[in-house]
Each structure stands twice: as structure tokens, then as C-alpha cells.
Amino acid sequence: MENDRYSISNLCVSCKKLSCCTDFFPPLLYPSDLIRLKNVGKSENEFLKNIRINGNVIKTIKKKENSTTCMFWDEEKRLCGIYNDRPFDCKMFPFDVVWTNNEYHWIVYSCNPESDWAWTEQYLQKLESDPQFNEMMQNNKGIRLTSDNPEYLANIEEPPYAVLRKVNWKE
Ligand code: SF4
């Protein structure tokens, strides 16, 4: 499936920008991310940063000094330096959950949001069955990232995105 014309691998291969780890909003971290990140060989002070969204304090990963690039991005290899321990937010990319029209919805970031996104359903179902998905939703209830939230958008040069469908999740 990964080699099909419409797949995540092709989506990212055709991306000319390769900016998801450089000028994108930093990944939001949840309790199990923080446990996994103990493996990266750095103290939390070195890589964690608190930010505020809708008045809630959320932990994220720092950017490199005077840079918009995630501190774990390996410039030489052009890869995530902590790939196996990367946060769930990074694993979800290019999918994301936003609160819009009074419901949580899946979106996909893409340079080409008008594409046929039918192929994404298998990925959405896989993400929804991941135990970390429930953890993320429980933790994000108070945040409700919305595409028109000024605090969210102030930190991001948001690429185009397409709304896929409502999120299947019960509290
Ligand atoms: S942790 Fe890795 S995948 Fe996530 S933003 Fe940083 S470099 Fe990219």
C-alpha cells in the first residue's frame, strides 16, 4: 500500500518544501511521549519548552537556537534524530486534529489540498486505534486547536490543509 500512487510516502516524496520539522508548529507532548523521550540522552531542560494555548500550558520540543528548526532534526542526514522515540504528534503528521464546526475533525496538511483523499481513511483508522490517540484527545480537550485560533496561528506559517472527516472518538 505504501508504494501506491496515493500514499503517505508519495505525498512526502513529492513535497518540495520538506519543512515539517523546520518551520512547523512544534509537536505537542503527552505523558507517554515524555516517558519515551527519556531515551534520547538529554535532560528535559535541554529539549522541553512550555507554551500556552488557549490559556493551557503545554509541553513541546524546543527549536534550535535562533532557528525555526526542531532541535532533533539532523541537518546532515535530513532525518529526525530521534525517529523511534518521536512524539505521537510527529507520527500523526501530515494528519492533525482540529476543533471546527463544533466537532473534532481530521485534517491533512498538503500543498495540494484539492486532491482525492479517499486513500487516507486507512491511516485515520489506524491512528484512531492507537492508544496514544485516546491520550492525545483526553489531553487536548481543554485546548481545542482550531484553524482560526490566533494563539495557534501566531506560531505557525500554516500550509494549506484539507478537512477529511469527523474524528471517531468517545470521551
Ligand atoms: S521530533 Fe523529529 S519528527 Fe518531530 S519535529 Fe522534531 S525532528 Fe521532526
Image (cartoon, helix red, strand yellow):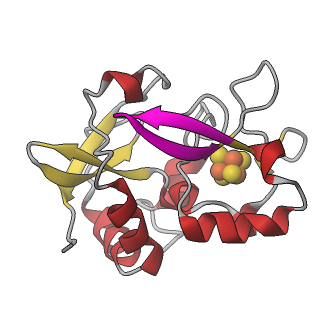
Residue at image coords 67%, 61%: 86
Q: Is residue 170 above or below residue 160?
A: below
Percent coordinates x, y for residue 115 in the rendering = 28, 45
* Camera sees residue 78: no
Magenta residues, dominant SS class: strand
Residue at image coords 46%, 67%: 4
Residue at image coords 24%, 62%: 118
Of the pair 144 and 82, the residue shown nearer to us: 144
56 falls in the magenta region? yes
58 falls in the magenta region? yes
Percent coordinates x, y for residue 26 in the rendering = 58, 39
Tell me where the magenta segment starts and ends, as one range.
Answer: 49-60
Q: Quadrant of residue 147?
A: top left
Q: Would residue 109 appear left or right of 162 to someone viewing this image?
A: right
* Camera sees residue 53: yes
Q: Quadrant of residue 133?
A: bottom left
Q: Would residue 132 appear left or right of 162 to someone viewing this image?
A: right
Q: Is residue 80 above or below residue 127?
A: above
Q: Residue furthest left?
A: 101
Q: Is residue 119 above or below residue 80?
A: below
Residue at image coords 20%, 54%: 104
Of the pair 111 and 21, the residue shown nearer to us: 21
Percent coordinates x, y for residue 145 in the rendering = 32, 41
Question: If the image is split into quadrants, where does the C terminus sit?
Answer: bottom left
Labels in figure, total: 0
Percent coordinates x, y for residue 48 in the rendering = 71, 45
